[in-house]
Image (cartoon, rainbow, N blue to C red):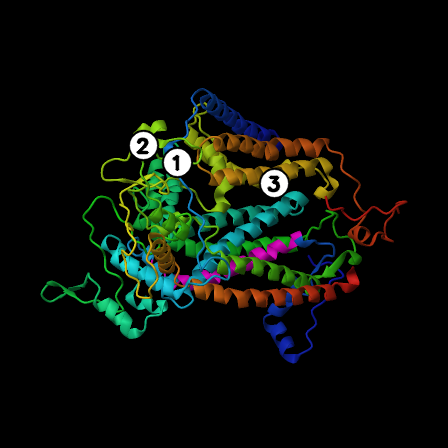
Amino acid sequence: MVRLFGPLVGLFFVAALLLSFGVGAYNAATQPTPPSAEKLFHMHPKDVKFSFDGPFGTFDKAQLQRGFKVYQEVCSNCHSLKQVAFRDLGALGYNEAEVKAIAKNWGTKAQTFDPKTGDRGERPNLPSDHFPPVYYAGQGNPPDLSLIAKSRHGGAQYIHSLLTGYVDQAGYKNEAGEELLKKFPDAKTPDGLYFNPYFANLNLAMPQPLTSEGQVTYSDGTKATVDQMAMDVSAFLTWTAEPKLDKRKQTGWPVLGFLLAATVLAYLAKRNVWADKH
Amino acid sequence: MSFPWANEYKPSHPLMQWIDEKLPLPRFVYNAVGAGYPVPRNLNYMWNFGVLAGFALVLQIVTGVVLAMHYAANAGVAFDSVEHIMRDVNWGWMLRYAHANGASMFFIVVYTHIFRGFFYSSYKAPREMIWLLGVVIFLLMMATAFMGYVLPWGQMSFWGAKVITGLFSAIPLVGPPLQEWLLGGFAPDNAALNRFFSLHFLLPFVILGVIILHVWALHIPGSSNPTGVEVKQESDTVPFHPYYTAKDGFGLGIFLMVYCALVFFAPNLLGHPDNYIPANPLSTPAHIVPEWYFWPFYAILRAFTSDFLIIPAKLMGVLAMFSAILVWFFLPWLDTSPVRSGHYRPLFRKFFYALVIDVLVLGYCGGAPAEEPYVMISQIASMYYFLHFLVILPIVSSIETPQPLPFSITEAVLGKDEHATLAPATPPSAPAVA
């Protein structure tokens, strides 16, 4: 019974697939889909190295502090950081007093609500508070940056490439030498958007945020070039996404080391047990 | 199976004798996985994967139960509760990565275990029931994993749930009302999330129950072995303990090393970045894909792009995707060759390797965008998949000339067996690695 109906069922599906394949192949041959502007002109992130790359990498706390300063002075005007609490900043090397001060002096205050009167009010942030929401009234929808490094392909490299990748669209050519506006006149950046080939859709609502050297003054004296600021904020945003990165790798090595030793012993024990049977 | 020469459980300590009289659990363990369970002596490392699968389930249950102490299954807070686990719960990040990567390891191990079954025809008589229970376990695993992935309520969680629950609407007549009833609404929302959490907590224990039946069914005939020749005599076997407890211990060490390398050094390698974006019903991701272990079936689902006879393409895809697993139920009756092991079936072996490559191709296409050339490749690969199980295997098992089998396991391992009634001029070799 099975050997009768089985092949029939199989041939049923194969027939449906042949039909789909035929129709698809015919369409692909007669009306091939031309590659889109995004496919031809989108750039993959630049290969830059960070201190936390690889199985041995760790965060550079000084870099994280610089990155936080960039976030504070540039990005926090539009982007929230709601998964991070002020107290978490202690991991960047700030002491308790500094963390309290950062929280207290943060521009947007915490909301309060008095259940007896129904009044809404404000109070300065405490270290236990999360970074408050950001109310942005302009064009576009600035995403929360807490997890941006894990929610985009390329992570920190993507963020760095995006921040440093703004170019003039007029005359822009890709690596093959094709000019974007000649090939795809419809890809002209609409009003209110900005051209950036590292962005998936090529045009995004965020204007170039890091425009000039010295835009942020670093307290450790590092030269605040656009590239440096981009690297630092990318590292900081990797920390906001993965605050336990250092702990994770630090735990991983003893665990793997133990397992390697135990597996070697288990192998020798297995050989011992099987000695008379081989 | 208790072969006649099995060691007998003889407790010497008075306490153990007391327990044996009142509740013979130690005796049960001794006879099931101890020195009282004879197992073929020639099992290779492909036989490690059943135990590893059981271990992976225990791992998932332990990490999952602890995660459930901190997770909140409400659409407004689910995503944030997972971030709370990652940031604030002590070792929460480790539990979360352990559970997510544990699911991947579970599927790696189970797929290897299943393909062992394909190659060595473990599904053949007298082991059909073990195989059927195994396919049931796999279906339950897929349901559990699907619902588990929805729980963080990220973009892929939501949209994956939307796609897969949307398949129910393809069923004629009852489809749309059935979909609404299952979801508790018109689209995945808080109702769906809550019931998925409940079922995701429940199903692993159902899986545990079916595994108990699966191992019980195995212990009736005992394990098969790489030659496919059944156990005949004492020299064919060794007691499970210490021989296979030792071998499984080593296998477990390798498993744990691979697993911990993932958890501690590449925890997001097998995941999709989009799931770190909170679910937004108004923003469809560019490419909706499930986790990697569903990719072969996703490719089969998306391969059906044309309506066929009276059946719409969407329904064809759904029927094919489920049939792709349901055909496994019928394997004991599709493959009728009396020879079990692929080592002695040269023609069958070639098609087995073709199947492995085919499934890998399907897997790659399942993770790729639904564009040409991937759709055409999935169509061809899906054709081969159904042909393999439903047309090729029955034909091959009828027309093939298998190689001569060894008389017994003893002959295969030691080169000769005194009990062989017709001693061959030259002893057949042990199964060559094909």
The verdict on a common chain for dots 3 and 1 is: no
Determine the CA span between mark 3 and mark 1: 37 Å
User: Label 2: how many residues lie within 10 Å, few (<14), some (14-19) or many (20+)?
Assistant: some
Q: In the rendering, which numbered label is found on residue A187? A: 2
User: B78 or A65: which is nearer to us?
Assistant: A65
Of all residues shown, which one is farthest toward the right? B425
Tell whether position B23 is magenta: no
Residue B318 placement, left or right of B180:
right
Residue A125: give x, y in percent of width and height: 21, 67
Pointer 3 chain? B
Pointer 2 chain? A
User: A229 or A114: which is nearer to us?
Assistant: A229
Q: Amino acid at mark 2?
A: Ala
Of all residues shown, which one is farthest toward the top? A30
Q: Residue at x 84, y 52 (%)?
A: B415
Q: Quadrant of the N terminus of chain B?
A: bottom right
- The residue stretch that appears in magenta: B46-72
N-terminal of the pair, mark 2 or mark 1, is 1
Residue B355 placement, left or right of A57:
right
B292 w.r.t. A187: above or below: below
Determine the CA span between mark 3 and mark 2: 43 Å
Helix, strand or loop: magenta stretch? helix
Q: Amino acid at mark 1?
A: Phe
Q: Amino acid at mark 3?
A: Val
CB under 8 Å between discs 3 and 1: no
Q: Quadrant of the C terminus of chain B?
A: top right
The residue that label 3 is drawn on is: B356
The residue that label 1 is drawn on is: A41
Q: Residue at x 31, y 54 (%)?
A: A145
Q: Residue at x 57, y 52 (%)?
A: B109
